[in-house]
Amino acid sequence: MVRQLGELENAIMTRVWRWNRPVTVREVLLDLQSEREIAYTTVMTVLDKLHRKGWLRRERVGRAYRYEPVSSREAYTAALMNDAWATGDNPAAALVHFFGLMSPEQREALRDALRVAALFPSDPAPTDSPPPPGADTGETGPGPTR
């Protein structure tokens, strides 16, 4: 189950995802300080917490760590949506309500995503079922009878 990020965790992850490279506590701190007062130890603690949650991997470089995301923001969002959908008693009704909350732009993005998903079906057709009547299987049957 994916837990939603808290406000500061989200602010930090947003930067890490946007930068798309390993980052240090100091880099994140300096960027956050342009918006709010925050202590080095607070940023360090949150980065460590995100590492322990599995959202960041880290590598020691000298005396500091460099952190990088384990997955994309899109994968995080998809996992949150999947978790939320799985908690309801009526997933179809939840989807209907969700679609009702979407903007026209979001609905168009959904249509695009469904078109892409249709190109890459996750469930292949069963191979042990016979072809539908009239299907051209490429096999040649017995020749004409005389």
Image (cartoon, grey):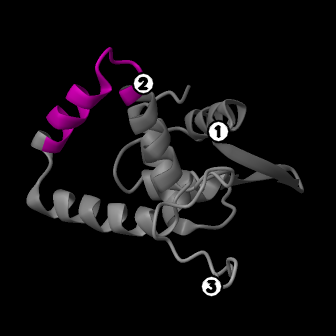
> Looking at the rendered structure, which numbered label has been put on residue 86?
2
Quote the CA–CA distance across marks 3 and 1.
Answer: 80 Å
What label sits on residue 62 in the rendered view? none
Q: Position of residue 51 (x, y in %)?
A: 70, 38
The main secondary structure of the magenta stretch is: helix
Local secondary structure at mark 2: helix
Left or right, 38 with reference to 53? left
Please identify the residue farthest to the top as the structure is shown: 89
Residue 64 image offset from top left, x and y in percent:
80, 50
Residue 142 spot, x, y in % from top left: 70, 78
The quarter of the picture where residue 95 lies is top left
**Residue 71 horizontal side relative to residue 39, left or right:** right
| Three-letter code, disc 3 | Pro
Q: Mark 3 or mark 1, which has the lower sequence index?
A: 1
- Mark 3–mark 2 Cα distance, whole angstroms, equals 56 Å
Mark 3 burial class by Cα count in 10 Å: few <14, some 14-19, many 20+:
few
Which range of residues does the magenta coloring cover? 85-99
- Was residue 130 drawn as part of the magenta stretch in this picture? no
Q: Badges 3 and 1: C-beta atoms under 8 Å apart?
A: no
Disc with the residue nearer the chain's start (3 vs 2): 2
Disc on res. 144:
3
Q: Which one is closest to the eye, mark 3 or mark 1? A: 3
Which residue is labeled 1 in the image?
44
Q: Nearer the viewer, residue 43 or 70?
A: 70
Q: Quadrant of residue 54?
A: top right
Residue type at tag 2: Ala
